[in-house]
Amino acid sequence: MEWHEVLVQQTINGLTRGSVFALIALGYTMVYGIIELINFAHGDVFMLGLFVSLTAFTLLGMARTLGGWELVTILPLVFLATMCCCGLVNVTIDRLAYRPLRHSARLAPFITAIGVSFMIENLALIWKGPAPVPYPDVFPSIDVLREWVGVDTLVYLTTKDLFVVGVTAPLMFGLQRFVTRTTWGKAMRAIAQDRETAQTMGINVEKMIMLTFFIGGALAGAAGLTQGLYYNIGTWYIGFQAGLRAFTAAVLGGIGNMPGAALGGLVIGFLSAWSDQYISARWTNAIVFSILILVLVFRPQGLLGEKTVDRV
Amino acid sequence: MRPSKWFGLTAVAALAIAVAAPAYAQQCPKGKLRIYTSWPMQGAMIPEGTGMKNGVDMAVTEAGGVAAGFCLEVVNLDDASPQTGKWDGAVEAENANKAVADPLAIVYIGTYNSGAAKVSIPINNRAHMAQITPANTYPGLTKKKGAAPGEPEIYRPMGFVNYFRVVPADDIQGAVGAKWAKRRGAKKVFVIHDQELYGKGIADVFDQTARSLGLQVVGNEGIDYKQPDQKPVLTKARATGADLIYMGGVVDTGAPIVIRQMKDLGMVAARNVRFMGPDGLLEEEVLKGATCDAAMATDMHVTFASLPFEKLKGIGATTYENYKKRFNKEPTAYALYSVEAGRIAIEGIKRAAAQIEKAKDPKDKREAVRQAIAKIKDYDGLNGKWSFDENGDTTLETMSGYKVVKADTPVGCKFEFETVLE
């Protein structure tokens, strides 16, 4: 392999890895933007997304590689079902665990979120057992460059790589448009800026918070499904690690800022892939978090975040 | 109310005495000695724990319950905590202390978990009691290779070796794996591991041995197995032109994803890249997770730290047959090694019989047995003739090599014995 082939391959690796991080980070950052809660359980909703979709495929008898028409019918169906299911789970978590604490000190819901995270993890542990669960190759893996383009290089790009980017990009753009262009989006942004004033303007704050949790959970579910299809394996504890990475991505991009979360996810994806290649895999976590620290020291608001002025 | 564990143990011990004593009374001119065993006997460990207990029982029964005029009693202790169902250092310490406090205790057989052995070896060492393990494979318990700083001396407060292994330690598997890799034509190897005690230990020994055999080691990387994406590390491996990926790890530390992603990146046997690992990967779960497609495409091979039961010869073969006849089932993974551990204990007692008889203090009796066991050479065991080396390890390096082949099972493939490795 020539050096440029290595670089291209690692960039592809980073892009797919980063896309999943970005998708999870969006949900994190949305919830934070509106109620300033670090929803620690978000990563675990992502993990549930993986298992829920696996169950859906199994129930439909489709736990195998799908063919042509099934890809445009079954796959979107399962996507929708998983997203709805995870959205509802997230809304339920909010109703049961966070809403009663809406007006307490910020630390209280945060600690609750950690508790919820443990509860979901342990439920998954009971449900699926401690061993890694294999996820069927639902999405066909085709070697794009050799079989479709006919180029024989050492760079490998499969349809699964394209799938990951093909799923995350529209979701991210769709969300961005929703938040910036629709009335509901406007309401969300208003609540993010000033909850009391938004309420006096006639915005149903609790409804909007519910919607935020639903969308956040749905995105986590989509990310879980994508991860399952791409890596074909799931374990009960993956939510913690993914949540940590996604949280880092959200902070890196500027917490509360949606394009920032997407950018942060991609940056972390690229950095970790390049670090695995050019430094050493065992240093990757240290490097990712060192860069986070450096960014926060020199740009505390994150890459795309705006400086906040303390309200007096 | 649940009867306490103490009650249970006392009852077991009392029962053992009550049953054993009359039967052997007339054959025991020199009195009685006790062999203590300790490993988990609860939860998921019930089958293996029972198999190991059967193994020791079988060794004692073969000898007619007697060694050189001493009647033998086996006291089985459980080192799992009733709360967690898993081995527990505190319980293991309690077991070892109980054995040491019994003046009739002469040998301690155990443990199953290397972590538990770390606790009981020093306790037995202070009491001069020999401890024989049928199952611990962590290298640091006996030697410097693949050990943490300070090991193994920290387990030998009295300065002598009292801990003996009838199973080969993990590092041997790394060494045997490297030899096999060379034999199978590997030239450039890339080593990865899960950064855990077992995986890293084996991977590092594989690395050293491969170098000394003249193979080129183009990388040795610890991976973060909690994150399900190893493509970057594998891309790095491919960029080095490696023709073999060796992974030190167990079933749930990332091997399935490594094998799968090797295939995604075109690192397959058809393009002259292969996969090899130690017996932590010799599990059907690995094939389920990795998919048979990927396992076969990467020409997956694994080493196993023993011969398969069907391939045993001589004493090994008869032991295997007798075990099946006696207990009416296949031995568990460490059941036959437990037979061997029991036989070594009895052999030690026989050789030290004269000193045991003379000695007054239990410590001196145990010391005599410890020395006798340490001197065992060219013992005709399950896998052939072997001796204890100066660390208390078996000199045996006979292992077997398995490869993945297509099979008519729900999984679609299986591990098949390929060759004996020495």
Image (cartoon, rainbow, N blue to C red):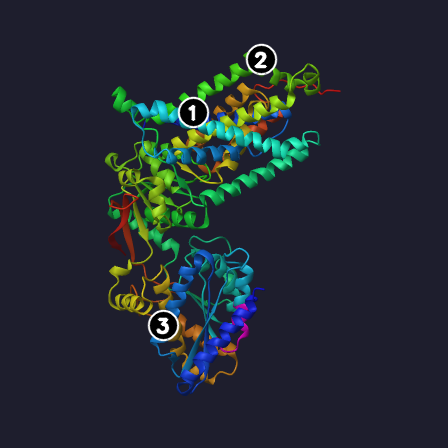
Instruction: Decide: is B204 above or below A272.
Output: below
| Element at label 2 | helix
Instruction: Decide: is B103 above or below A196.
Output: below
For image coordinates 51% across by 22% down, the residue present is A262
Which residue is tagged 2? A183
User: Dividing the image into 4 quarters, which one contains the C terminus of chain A?
Assistant: top right
Which of label 3 and label 2 is nearer to you?
Answer: 2
Badge 2 density bin: few <14, some 14–19, many ≥20, Cα 10 Å: few
Look at label 1 and name its amino acid: Leu
Label placed on residue B59? 3
Q: Earlier in the sequence, mark 2 or mark 1?
A: 1
Residue A3 in view here? no
Look at label 2 and name its amino acid: Thr
Q: CA distance from mark 2 to mark 1?
A: 32 Å
Label placed on residue B326? none
- The residue closer to the viewer here, B2 or A240, is B2
Q: Callout 1: residue from which chain?
A: A
Q: Outermost residue toward the top?
A: A181
Q: Position of residue B346 (x, y in %)?
A: 38, 75
Which of label 2 and label 1 is nearer to you?
Answer: 2
Question: What is the magenta range?
Answer: B96-105
Rendered image quadrant of residue B193: top left
